Structures are given as C-alpha cells and as structure tokens.
Amino acid sequence: MHDTNVITANPIAEPYSAKAFASAVTSLSLHHFRNYASLKLDAATVPIVLTGPNGAGKTNILEALSFLSPGRGLRGAKLSSIDRQGGSMAWAVSALLDTARGDVRVGTGRDPSVTGEQGKRLVKIDGETTGSHATLAEVMTVLWLTPQMDQLFLEGASARRKFFDRLVYGFHPGHATLVNAYERAMRERSRLLTERRGDPKWLSALERKMAESGIAIAAARLEMEDRLNQTLRMAESAFPRAEVSIAGDAEQILPEMSAVEAEEWLQNRLEKARSEDMYTGRTSIGPHRSDMRVKHNEKKQPAEQCSTGEQKALMLSLVLADARAKKAWNGQTPILLLDEMVAHLDAGRRAALFEEILALGAQAWMTGTDPLLFSSLKGQAQFVRVEDAQVISG
Ligand SMILES: Nc1ncnc2c1ncn2[C@@H]1O[C@H](COP(=O)(O)OP(=O)(O)OP(=O)(O)O)[C@@H](O)[C@H]1O
Ligand SMILES: [Mg+2]
C-alpha cells in the first residue's frame, strides 16, 4: 500500500527517488519580483556572498531562491505582495540547476489568471507544468535561516514543524505531497464537521486518508530525527551539539506498533474526536500538531532557554548536520540560504562556518552589509555586490 513499514523497519533507507537532486543553482532570473524589474545572475557552484546596503535587494534574491522549493518562500508572503509595486505583471523566477543528471530548468511564479487573496503558484520543471509545487522537493532541497527565525523557539509549534518537515523533504521527496494530502483531507473533514452535514461514510473516508498519510508523515519524521541525531553525535563542529526530537502523538505511538496498526489507531482516534472537533472547529489529534524540540546537549538546556546567539548556533548546527547527512546519503548537499547569519557570529564561529561550508562543497548563499566579514572567503566564493536592485559580480 505504502512504504511506512519499510521506513520503520529500516530507519536509514536508501534513496528511492529516481530523480536527481540539484546541488547548485547555476543561473537565476527574476522578473517583476519585489524591487527587481528583471535580473539575471550567473552563479558558480561555490558559496555565494551577497553584500550591499540595507534595502538593496539581498534578501529578495534569497526569497526568490526559496521559491525553488515547495511552500510560500522564506517570508511566507502572500503571492500578490511579491509582484513589483507599481507594475501590473505577475512575478516569476527561473533557474538552471546543476544536478547529478545534467541541467534542469525550473520556473515558478504567480499564476496571473488566478485572482483572490491566496493566489496560485505555477511550477514548471524542464518546461512541463507540474500539478503541485510539492514536486519541487524531488528536484532540489533548499534550507534557510533568517533573522525572523530568531523567534522560532519562542513561537508556536507550526514554524518549528515546518522547518523540520523541510529537512525531511531532502530525504523523502514525497513528504511534501503527503503533507499536502493530509492537510487537504483535514480541511475537508473540518469543513464537514463545522457545517454539521458530515455523512459518516464520507468522514470515515477522509479520516482513512488522514490516517494513512499521517502515519507515513510521522514515520518519515522519526527517520529524520534518527538520522540527524546520529550525524550530530558524530559531529566535529564548532557549533553546539544539538539533540533534536519530534514530539507528537502519532510519532510517539509509531515505534510501539506496525504502521498498519498505527493507521488504525489514528483513524479510531479521529473518529472518536468528531464531536470535540465539531465543537472546537479544530482537529485535536494528528501529525499537524507535532513539534520539533531541540536541546543544547553540552548545556543540557532546551533551546527555548538558550540565549539568542546560542539559539542561532543551534539552528546552524542542525542545518549543517542535515547537509552532512544528505551528502553522506546521496552525495548531494542542500542549497543553503543564510540571511544575515554571519554578522551575528563571533570571529571563531564565523571561520568555522565558512570552513564547514567549504568542506561540504555546499552552495551557501550568504548575505550581509559588510563585505569585510567575508574576506577570508576570497578566492573560494563568488562575491556579488547588490545595489539598488542591480548586481555586480566580482
Ligand atoms: N513588492 C515589492 N515591490 C517593490 N519593492 C519591494 C517589494 N517588496 C519589497 N520591496 C523592497 O525591496 C527592497 C529590498 O528588500 P530586501 O529585503 O531584499 O533588502 P536587503 O538588501 O536584504 O536589505 P537589508 O540589508 O536591510 O536586509 C526594500 O526596499 C523593500 O521595500
Ligand atoms: Mg535583508
């Protein structure tokens, strides 16, 4: 039926995607994207340093890159707010990706024919429109850390869960599609319950779908937790040793039973929760409620009790461990978008970050206002000066 049993039986499974993963973007074009009317940037398969004054358009370039993966980009923005102000055109991003199987062209942008609050994002891979942007996870993995994520350990679970699921995409490209399928069924069930016109058979069919996709989601997360902790334990890193866990009811139950039993368990729990969920308008159980917990291992402290600088270092530690794990797994590294990360690190950690990125061979796109902070990367990275929505490579 599906491969959750395989996943639990063999936690560190071999890659099953037939598609190649990209390790680098070699060319990036933006059209009507925020402050860019149009931009073309050729990139080498090395770290890329974007420097320039405040408001120049550095983060916008990272945001454009984040749209090469599923979801709403690193700002979680409304699609229409990305259209260049003052223009009347829908934004578009196109990129050439360097993959193990040759070049792949990816294009994405707002569908101009769809109006309304949410809008719709179109995705084309090698000229062919895909049904869902979840497909992008099959082509490349993009991970980001931004200054806004300083709040990650202080806010609700949703942002942490999304961050963790993005790590999972790199190893289970179908994970994004599963999460979408689960959420679609959950929304439909909620709608039926709140409208109080739920035909029990219809509700059961939706709960079955939620149980199947939900347990597969939980299994992939547990596998990721294992993989990441194994990598973190082996780490020779200047960044604090983190320990990560994914806390949720489905994730907790799964190691105790087979995937089929866990699906039945979740379906039963959903059925029993109908009247409560009808009353609250929420779905009280399932992997959409899970949380990522991170611990600073040396300090034996949960991340939320660590200082802002320590939290940043923990997040970098996770992202670097993920990149190491991915490289060991299929030889590819994720594309890393590190917005303003470097300015907040002390000199020792900064040097360590550059060293780890270079050792990984990861295409890390790093921004900052001060090029001097990156001077030790001269000759090993591509330096791009961004000024008033123009770029100069040097
Ligand atoms: N839809 C839009 N249309 C036009 N300009 C926009 C749009 N959205 C944002 N901008 C502008 O894009 C400019 C560049 O923003 P960006 O966040 O990329 O700057 P930055 O170089 O990262 O600056 P900082 O160093 O302050 O982080 C800003 O002046 C912002 O107001
Ligand atoms: Mg910025």
Image (spheres, rainbow, N blue to C red):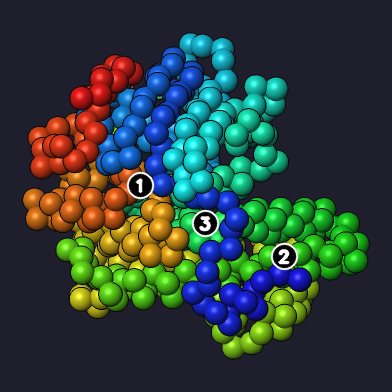
Residue plotted at (18% across, 53% down)? 355
Q: Quadrant of ligand 1?
A: top left
Q: Which residue lies furthest to the bottom in this view?
A: 256
Labelled pair 3, 2 in contact (Cβ < 8 Å): no
Mark 2 crowdedness (10 Å alpha carbons): few <14, some 14-19, many ≥20: many
Question: Which SS class for mark 2?
Answer: helix
**Mark in the foreground, 2 or 1:** 1
Q: Is mark 2 within 8 Å of ligand 1?
A: no
The residue lying at 39 percent from left, 69 percent from top is: 228
Check disc 1: other Cα within 10 Å, few if <14, some if 14-19, many if 20+.
many
Q: In the displayed structure, does residue 347 sit left or right of residue 394?
A: left
Location of the N terminus by quadrant is bottom right
- Disc 1 is placed on an element classified as strand
Residue at the (21%, 69%) spot, across then down:
236
Residue 12 position within the rendered picture, expressed as x and y whole percent measured from the top left: 49, 74
User: Which residue occupies the foreground of this view, 208 or 371?
Assistant: 371
* Residue hosting label 2: 210
- The amino acid sitting under disc 3 is Tyr
Which of pointers 3 and 2 indicates the residue nearer the eye?
Answer: 3
Label drawn at residue 169: 3
Residue 15 at x, y percent in the picture? 53, 64
Q: Earlier in the sequence, mark 2 or mark 1?
A: 2
Mark 3 or mark 2, which has the lower sequence index?
A: 3
Q: What amino acid type should be assigned to the residue bearing mark 1?
A: Leu
| Gap between marks 3 and 2 measured at Cα | 19 Å
Amino acid bearing label 2: Met
Q: In this view, does 282 lie to the left or right of 140?
A: right
Frontmost residue, 100 versus 384:
100
What residue is drawn where x is 47% and y is 69%?
A: 224
Task: Answer with the quarter of the image where residue 231 lies.
Answer: bottom left
Q: Where is residue 145 in the image (x, y as percent from the top left)?
A: 34, 48
